[in-house]
Image: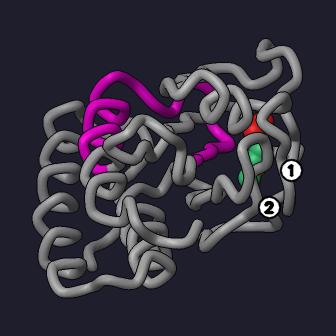
Amino acid sequence: MWPPLSPGAPRADRLARHADLAVSLESLLADEEDWIAAMATVACELHHAFAAWHWTGFYRAVTADLLVVGPYQGGHGCLRIPFGQGVCGAAARTRATQLVPDVHAFPGHIACASSTNSEVVVPVLRPDGSVLAVLDVDSDLPAAFDEADVAALETLCASLGRRYAGARP
Ligand code: SME
């Protein structure tokens, strides 16, 4: 663990933190076959790496059109999100990352916390393309996430999707 990176840290510092996280998570999960343990560990490590990441966690795709909350860090998270609702639902439905600099401008955004201003949601896809889960990160700051975060989180989620493809969601 390291001190959380301050909001507004230079891009180079954020890239370095993502690189450190990738190494750390690879090592922490190296022998871990349990998907819940993996999600809990990822949520914890990501959440404490960036001070602006106020809610960090997973929603699991328990059926073809329903997400149920999984391991997370932060305040209260909504328990169930249909694929047809919210930013998380959009990520699951489209199987594409949703980068939302202003949640108030996103039609149907679900405000689990009224303090949230920006959000990024990345799907965790199995190799066959089906959705295992989504990784949701919310911030109280506007436009807290950018392409560097998206690239790092997509690499991480691709790895998780390959690795835990056979897990019960
Ligand atoms: N904002 C999300 C809901 C999940 S939480 O904020 C933890 C959404 O619109 O999907």
> Going 40% across and 84% down the picture, which residue do you hit?
34
**If the image is split into quadrants, where does the C terminus sit?**
bottom right
Q: Is residue 116 visible?
A: no
| Circle 1 residue | 112
> Going 45% across and 46% down the picture, which residue do you hit?
124
Q: Does the beta carbon at disc 2 come under 8 Å from ligand 1? A: yes
Give the quadrant of residue 24.
bottom left
> Going 55% across and 72% down the picture, which residue do you hit?
168
Left or right of 41? Residue 106 is right
Lower sequence index among marks 1 and 2: 2
Left or right of 12? Residue 38 is right
Q: Does the beta carbon at disc 1 come under 8 Å from ligand 1? A: yes
| Circle 2 residue | 77
Magenta-colored span: 136-156
- Quote the CA–CA distance across marks 1 and 2: 6 Å
Whether the residues at callouts 1 and 2 have beta carbons within 8 Å, the answer is yes
Residue 44: give x, y in percent of width and height: 45, 74
Relative to 6, is 142 above or below? above
Residue 25: give x, y in percent of width and height: 22, 70
Q: Is 2 inside the magenta-drawn segment?
A: no
Crowd rating for badge 1 (residues with CA inside 10 Å; few <14, some 14–19, many 20+): few
Q: Secondary structure at mark 2?
A: loop
Left or right of 110? Residue 130 is left
